[in-house]
Amino acid sequence: MDFKNLGINENIINVLNKNGIKTPTPIQEESIPKILDGKDIIGEAKTGTGKTFAFLLPIFQNILPNSKDIQVLILSPTRELAIQITDECKKFNVNNDINILSVYGGKDIGNQLKKLKNNIHIIIATPGRLLDHINRKTINLSKLKTIVIDEADQMLLMGFKNDIEKIMKFTSKKHQMLCFSATIDSQVKKLAYRYMVDPLFIDVKSPTISIDKIKQEVIETTDRWKQNALCAALKEDNPFMAIIFCRTKRRADTLEIALHQKGFNCQKIHSDVPQAKRERIMKSFRKADIQYLIATDVAARGIDISSVSHIYNYDVPETPESYIHRIGRTGRAGEDGYTCMFIAPKDSYHLNEIEEKLGFKIPRREI
């Protein structure tokens, strides 16, 4: 199957080819024809399987550049993901005839208001800032053709359910609704079904994530020696680019200072880091000017950088699903990946849960 068979036009296929994308992923194969047909979709596929292009390609194919209305709303749980989706959108706007606006907190609202005076076709937004614009009457969603809720599980986890319900009251009565998520539980389904008409459920099972191409290891240590163990692993591996996951913002702060003192090229990213600085850090990381990105789960949501070769779980994730989300940041685009988790005795319960979910015991690594 290729993109032409899915109904995607030559202009979009040329952009994909320029970006080295020749073959659709399973979630794209399943979703694109149905979205082009105007169906409402609930799509479940793991991190790194191409969910963003699954909805962006048909959106760009169906957009009307001459219209003065906002035609598409894409809701994102985090600013980082909103920025990333916006960057992907810009790739397809080859003629600059589609006006795209990202709307999120921490960004100058005056600049957003200025851009809204022009005709905007696509809005990518976090719920809070979008509601702010709706209340100011600076954004009119009454003519929307398509609404996308991206990373719906994270939306609910971060408490955006009420915000989404408020936003939906201001949208067009008739529109296409697309809901994509790495995990679709009963709460996500309940939210989706409330606003959808006879939705199709597309579930691309986990073999399509390249978790098989990710080498996983565990280093058994103690809280006291964890930092030394991490530094020893980093020196031994010297990865091209890596993300180091911490459980809290405070632990990310502490680790960044410690790694800097030891000469590691690293930066932290979490919700207390000012937005402009976060954007600069992410830009530097994408260019590989930063070797180690220290991140919390929320800040890292939606980071999709194919050059990330290693993931280090400095702190054990809360759930097996979070572990899979984290390690899915490596081994992208068919490349091999490596992930290492640091386990103190108190973490054994979480480790057992993760190994049970994976169906095997993760090999131990000696440092």
Image (cartoon, rainbow, N blue to C red):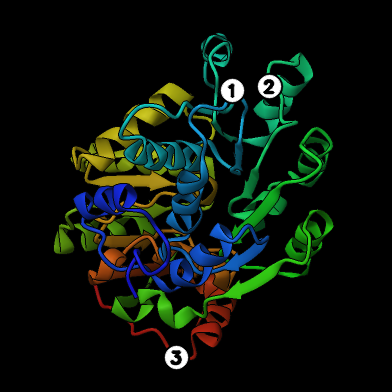
Amino acid type, mark 1: Lys
Q: Residues within 10 Å of mark 1 (few under 14, many from 20)?
A: few
For residue 176, the mark is none
Amino acid type, mark 2: Ile
> Do we see residue 55 in this rendering?
yes
Q: For this view, does 292 lie left or right of residue 65?
A: left
To which residue does mark 2 refer? Answer: 139
Q: Quadrant of residue 34?
A: bottom right
Q: Position of residue 238 (x, y in %)?
A: 15, 57
Q: Quadrant of residue 271?
A: top right
Mark nearer the viewer, 3 or 2: 2
Quadrant assignment for the N terminus: bottom left
Q: For this view, does 202 lie left or right of residue 280?
A: right
Please tell me how many numbered marks the rendered image carries: 3
Chain-order first, disc 3 or disc 1: 1
Q: Residues within 10 Å of mark 3 (few under 14, many from 20)?
A: few
Chain-order first, disc 2 or disc 1: 1
Q: Position of residue 279 (x, y in %)?
A: 39, 29
Q: For this view, does 174 lie left or right of residue 9?
A: right
Mark nearer the viewer, 3 or 1: 1
Q: Position of residue 14 (x, y in %)?
A: 24, 50
| Dot 1: element | loop
Name the residue located 30 percent from the left edge and 34 percent from the top edge: 283
**As drawn, 97 above or below 117:** below
To which residue does mark 1 refer? Answer: 68
Q: Position of residue 84 (x, y in %)?
A: 42, 41
Mark nearer the viewer, 2 or 1: 1
Amino acid type, mark 3: Phe
For residue 360, the mark is 3
Q: Quadrant of residue 209?
A: bottom left
Chain-order first, disc 3 or disc 2: 2
